[in-house]
Image (cartoon, coloured by chain):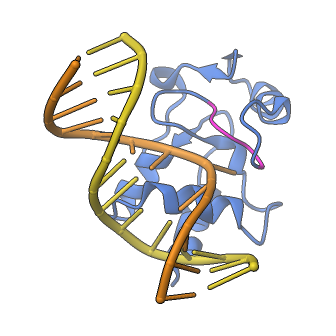
Chain colours: A blue, B yellow, C orange
Amino acid sequence: MNFSEKVLALTKKIPKGKVTTYSEIAKALNTKAYRAVGSALRNNKTPILIPCHRVINSDGNIGSYKGIKDSNEKVRLLKGEGVEVRDNRLDLKKYLFRF
DNA sequence: AGTCGAGCGCGCA
DNA sequence: TGCGCGCTCGACT
């Protein structure tokens, strides 16, 4: 099982209305390659099945989506799931999903 | 506080 | 082979 596949598999498990962080995923995989997590999501082959918009930075910042730092798409999607997003930020305490 | 640099894994040239 | 990326965290200002 490739690193990317593991990342994608975990990402699929994020419930609707919740989000997770790159560091959480990296820790769940027992690795320090946080960047690779982002890379995997960026290069994911099944964007439909993988809700990449539910993966954010460790400080609650949305980060990037599709290579763009402030993509309203991502915010819109999250809001559509009941997540409060303001200025590309959200409340990790409320919405963080841990494995 | 803010900034800097090193570490990791995979993809693309 | 080598470099860059949807990142993070510890050390220094």
Residue A63 found in image quarter: top right
Percent position (x, y) of residue A21?
A: 50, 42
Q: Is residue A63 magenta?
A: yes
**Closer-to-camera residue (A40/A9):** A40
Q: Is residue A18 visible?
A: yes
Percent position (x, y) of residue A3?
A: 50, 75
In this rendering, position of residue B8 left or right of residue A52: left
Question: Could you tell me how many numbered marks the image carries?
Answer: 0
In this rendering, position of residue C12 left or right of residue C8: left
Magenta: main secondary structure: loop
Q: Image point 44% across, 55% down: which residue?
A: A34
In the displayed structure, B6 sits above or below A6; it is: above
**Closer-to-camera residue (A7/A14):** A7
In this rendering, position of residue B7 left or right of residue A52: left
Residue B13 found in image quarter: bottom right
In this rendering, position of residue B1 left or right of residue A68: left
Q: Image point 57% across, 27% down: which residue?
A: A61
**Closer-to-camera residue (B7/A49):** B7
Q: Is residue A99 visible?
A: no
Percent position (x, y) of residue A8?
A: 61, 65
Percent position (x, y) of residue A40?
A: 61, 65
* Magenta extent: A62-66
Q: Image point 72% across, 59% down: which residue?
A: A50
Q: Is residue A95 magenta?
A: no
In the displayed structure, A32 sits above or below A81; it is: below
